[in-house]
Structures are given as structure tokens and as C-alpha cells.
Amino acid sequence: MAAGRNGLITALDIGSTKVCCFIARPDGAGGMRVIGIGHQIARGMRAGAVVDMEAAEEAVRGAVEAAERMAKERIASVLLSFSAGRPASRLIDVETDIAGHEIGERDLKRAQAQAHLLAQRASEGREILNTIPAGYSIDGTPGYREPRGMFGARLGLRLHVVSADIGPLRNLKLLAERCHLEIAALVVAPYASGFSTLVEDEMDLGVTLIDMGGGSTDVAVFYDGHMIHTDQVPVGGNHVTNDIARGLSTSSAHAERLKTLHGSAVAGPDDEHAMVSVPRVGESGADAVQQIPRSMLIGIIQPRIEETLELVRDRLQASGLARTAGRRAVLTGGAALLTGVREHAARVLDKQVRVGRPLGVHGLAEATEGPAFATAAGLLAYAERGPGQGHTEYLAEAASGDGRIQRLGRWFKENF
């Protein structure tokens, strides 16, 4: 679906803290082999949204050009992740009369067209990002994943619709245009992360994916092989860094370094005696560096991590899907690497928790094999597996220049 003229597939993850570009080629064995990697510190981004177009463009160009140099190829189209604009889920159920004949492609498209019409009405003022079939039913009996070839009187479809605010989405599209990149598909970030970190049994039995990024924490619930819910908590790893910077009167760069080298979300027996050097912001000379016990640093980090996980728990309970989400949770994103986060997640969420790393993507460098790069790797897995499962991307039509009249004409052609 997203392969360029040279057969390559490019994933671009523009986050709050980093911009990552993977260029890959199908390896012929059902997987992807990465041949180009580029990543830059994200600039001009906040909580996944563009706030400085010039700075963001420079970061994206740098990441893409680095990946192109490594791959020795030029790319024009990308699979792009999206996490801004308050992504929200809605499940839409429709039924269509099939008069007892064998169910075919035309019947599925008719049901999807009805669901899309309802989704557009329900998402007024917002842009539809992804529409994902979350299951079919025949004559009121649910549980069908592939109804083609079956017989029945009525075909039902449950469609999972993910929408977002229009403004941040248009700004991201403008950013891609300024970098001379065509968007082959736009995929909500936790959905992409799920493709790279979850195994099939987890998706079937029920699992909660928690993508702990820099500017926000994205949540996705998978059940019966599909993503059935997504939500977002506006708190991420950057908030921990800011807490450290304010609490210890140091710069953001030093706060990030302290978090990475000495930070933890759980206290240890030696933390009162282990001393950490903290450069004070704006000072020089003998008083420029202060010594603090490591327990003080942990005392700043721990409450913010607990707050984030408690917000995730509350959102899951409010969605009514806490039980459907199963007894397992998978953590991804750069903040998931912080010591003690997994233990806190297991306690707060009352689930079995593991840290998810990219699976099924070959050729990754050691520095890009961790959970911080799960979304970019998941975009590659999506290109291989997602469209084949019947997932409809709204940008597939937008990129081809089709307007509402053209789409309406194509719908009549396909269904009558």
C-alpha cells in the first residue's frame, strides 16, 4: 500500500521529543528489513502538535535525509503517526440486509459505507483518522472476522472510528508538504505501536497498550484481534523532566540527564546516602553545583509517574472497557524505560505488565531496538499487515485528490 516506486516503505514518527524515520524493504519472509535510520531531537513540537513550523521542518528534514543517506535511496511518500488533537474513539454498529445470499465484497462495502456515513455525522467538527472494522455479525450472531462466503439474512458491522481535532491534523499535513513528503497513510500512534509490540494471543485475549511518550501518554485497548478503543492522557516524560528542573532549580537539559542517569520511580535502601551533583541554572563558580541525595530526585519523579498511571486507570474505567482490556498491559515509549515504571503500572492498574519492544522488524540498530521506537517500527508492520485486514485510511482518498463528489460517484459504481 505504502511502497514507493523503488519498493521501499518509509515510516515517519514525529513526536514531542524526537523525530524518527525508518526506511525498510520487505524481506520476502513476511517481515521488514530496515535499511535506513534517521532520528533527530524534535523541535517545534509540543504534545505531538506543531507549534513552530520552521523548527519542526528542520528536524523532519534532518531525520529523513539521514535515513536516505544510510539507505542510499530517495523517498517521496511516508506512513505517518499522529498523536495530537485529542484522539478519541467511537464504536459504530450498523446492519444491512443481504437477503440470504452469499456475502461478498459488495456487501462488506455497503456496510462500511453506512458506517462511514454515521461516523461522519457523529464526528462533526473533527477529522476521521482511522476506521477499523472491529468485528462482524451475521443474523445477530457476533464473532465473525471474515464473513465473505458465509450466508445469512443480515450482515452487521462494528466499526471503530478514531477522530481528532482538525487544526493539529492540518498543521501536520502542512509540515509534510513543506518537507516534500506525500502521506500514504496516517495512523494513530498507539495503534501503530500495537502492531510492533503485541503478539497475536495478547490481541485476541485482551490487552492494554500504554505508550508513554514525551508530551502525552496514549492508551489503546485490543480485543479479539482488533483495536477497540484509544484515549490519551496529556502527561508524559517531559512533565517529569520539567518537575525535576523546577524542583532542583536546574536547566531542562540537566534535568533530562539526571532523569536518565540517576532517575527511578521506586526508592532503594541506599538512596538517602547516594549523592547526585545538580548544576544550578544561571549560576557559576563554587556555588554552581549542589549535592543532593538521590532520594530527593526520586521523590520528585515518583508522584508524577503515579499520577500518570492513575489517570490511565481512571480513563479505562470511564470507558467501560476495563474488563475487556484484559489482565495484561504492555508499556512502550521512551518513558517506559525509567526504572520502576513497570512495577508501578502493575500495582496501579492491577495487571501483569511487560515492556514492549519492536518485534518482526529486522536490521534495527541497537540504539533503536527499544520501546521508544515502537511507533516507527509499528508503522512498518502496519504497512505489511494493516491494510490487508480491511482497515480504511481517510488519507488514501485525500492523497489521490478525490473530493466528495468523486467519492460519492465511486461508491455508486461499487454498490449498484
Image (tube, rainbow, N blue to C red):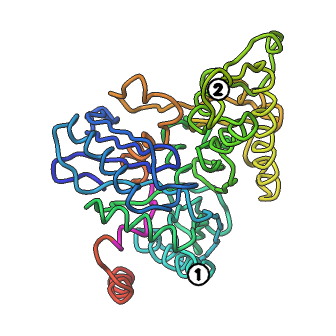
**Does residue 12 lie above or below 265 as drawn?**
below
Q: Quadrant of the C terminus?
A: bottom left
- Helix, strand or loop at mark 1: loop
At horizontal 52% and vertical 60% (from top left) the residue drawn is 49
At horizontal 39% and vertical 68% (from top left) the residue drawn is 395
- Helix, strand or loop at mark 2: helix
Type of the residue with mark 2: Ala
Type of the residue with mark 1: Gly
Q: Do residues under tags 2 and 1 come within 8 Å of each other at their CB atoms?
A: no
Name the residue that disc number 1 marks.
125
Which quadrant of the view contains residue 35?
Answer: top left
Q: Is residue 130 visible?
A: yes
**Does residue 250 lie above or below 54 as drawn?**
above
Tag in front: 2 or 1: 2
Q: What label does residue 288 carry, if any?
A: 2
Earlier-in-chain disc, 2 versus 1: 1
x%, y% of residue 177?
A: 31, 65
* Magenta stretch contains residue 120: no
Which quadrant of the view contains residue 120?
Answer: bottom right
Q: Judge by depth and name the residue closer to the eye, 38 or 356.
A: 38
Q: Judge by depth and name the residue closer to the eye, 52 or 229.
A: 52
Which region is colored magenta? 389-398
x%, y% of residue 110?
A: 47, 77
